[in-house]
Amino acid sequence: MSEDWERHRAFLAVLREGSLSGAARRLALAQPTVRRRIADLEAGLGVALFTRAPDGLVPTDAALGLRQHAEAMEIAAAAFARGATQGSEIAGLVRVSASDVISVEILPPILADLRRRYPRLVVALSPNNRNEDLLRREADVAVRMVRPEQGALVARRIGDIHVGLHVRADLLAGRPAPANFEEVVAFGLIGVENDNAVTRAMRAGGIPIRVEDFAFRSDSDLAQLAALRAGLGIGVCQVPLAARDPALVRILPDAFSHALDTWVVMHEDLRTSAPVRAVFDALVAGLQEYLRPGEP
């Protein structure tokens, strides 16, 4: 790596750790080395980047303004390093981005099988409902629940993953299942604190849902899923995921069904990288298998 990048790397480490000693531990360097790199960077820029405080180093306004640029350099450096090590051998680091639920509930066994076949492959998984930017190489491969709009991408459509209303079967023992949405709300509905794509789709489908209707609220999809499994009420869940859990039953399938258009995507420059292609193909195959039992 260039000397210039090493200075910016030290700068990011101090920003994140708040001290020279913490940055040194993070980078596995001696503290004087980190101090010298920060001093060299400040001298080259002609500005002070940190001021001393009783509990460590505080970034100046100039440092905060430079953070985004340094992080862009970090992403580019990581992509460069991966490109240098990834040839025809299926080894090295591949970054994967997917939604919280897909990352936690669906991908681990797919990736475990992949690692058994290619033990030198390293996968960094980012559970994130934000679509990370493949063009900026924030991820090498992404699972997206919307059709990709960016150019310069290789995309494979998996299909529609349907979501529907589900409830623990034992909560219905001795009582009829809700027959309409008003009865669902009266039963107890799990939902969000703020509007999202699912609530908007429900309203577009003629269901007048409001945040006030939710008996349990969280903007975390994983928290909602945990609440559904714990029996806090009726919640929205991916149909093939719920089909794996015998404790869950679907209700009102005709009244509410929302489709997530699912794709596996990578940057076109990575199509010749054997490890990235192996991960891409494994995700396509694994997600197609996941979708198959839950197709309506």
Image: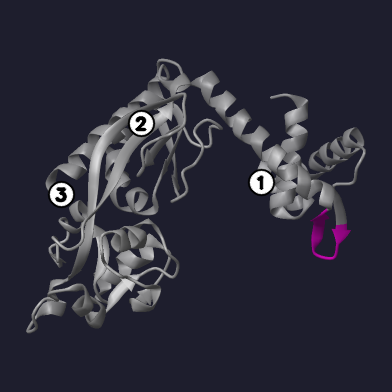
Q: Quadrant of the N terminus?
A: top right
- Residue 221 versus residue 215 in the image, above or below: above
Quarter of image, res 172: bottom left
Residue 68 is situated, as x and y percent measured from the top left of the image, at 69, 42
Q: Which residue is mark 1?
A: 26
Residue position marked by numbered label 3 in the rendering = 294
How far is disc 3 from disc 1 in space, using C-alphas? 44 Å
**Mark 2 → mark 3, Cα distance in angstroms:** 31 Å
SS state under label 1: helix
Q: Residue at x 47, y 20 (%)?
A: 269
Q: CA distance from mark 2 to mark 1?
A: 26 Å
Residue 29 seen anywhere in this rendered image of the structure: no
Residue 244 percent location from the top left of the image: 16, 56
Of the pair 115 and 268, the residue shown nearer to us: 268
Q: Which residue is mark 2?
A: 119
Q: Which mark is residue 51?
A: none
Task: Specify the quadrant of the image occupied by residue 81.
Answer: top right
